[in-house]
Image (tube, grey):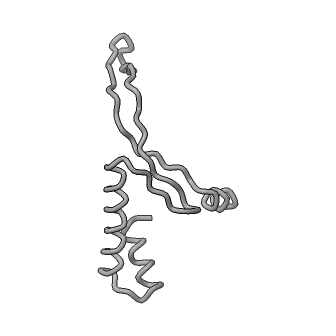
Amino acid sequence: MTKRELVVRISNETNLTQQEVFAVVQKTLDYVTESLVKGETVEFRDFGVFEIKVRKPRIGRNPNKPANTVTIPERRVVKFKAGKEMKSRVLKS
């Protein structure tokens, strides 16, 4: 599902214009991103949790030339952990 498809679906179900729904969806995503940039955890009950984790630096190798090693630096990544309700609904399907 794309953001556009989500906006159209919500618009059809709520009788709001697509522009209004788009503005709300975009603001929501902007605030989630803003919180993650600050290092905060974003939790939606029964849906899941977004959080920032730091990956340790490690050694990588070129599969075509395994003798060459490359140092991959430490970096921050976004992790998502599904909530109970989402897990149960996905497992049922």
Looking at the image, the residue that sits furthest to the right is: 92
The residue that appears at 41% across and 71% down in the rendered structure is 5
The residue that appears at 44% across and 51% down in the rendered structure is 41
In x, y percent, where is residue 73? 32, 26
Q: Nearer the viewer, residue 40 or 16?
A: 40
Q: Give the answer, above or below, for where 37 lies relative to 75.
A: below
Q: Quarter of the image holding residue 86?
A: bottom right
Q: Give the answer, above or below, for where 30 lies relative to 21.
A: above
Q: Quadrant of the C terminus?
A: bottom right
Q: Quarter of the image holding residue 69?
A: top left
Label total for image: 0
The residue that appears at 36% across and 10% down in the rendered structure is 67
In x, y percent, where is residue 33? 34, 56
Q: Give the answer, above or below, for where 45 lies relative to 18.
A: above
The residue that appears at 41% across and 32% down in the rendered structure is 55
In x, y percent, where is residue 80? 49, 49
Looking at the image, the residue that sits furthest to the top is: 67
Q: Quadrant of the N terminus?
A: bottom left
Image side of residue 91 versus residue 26, left or right? right
In x, y percent, where is residue 68? 33, 13
Q: Nearer the viewer, residue 37 or 16?
A: 37
Q: Quarter of the image holding residue 2?
A: bottom left
Q: Nearer the viewer, residue 45 or 47?
A: 45
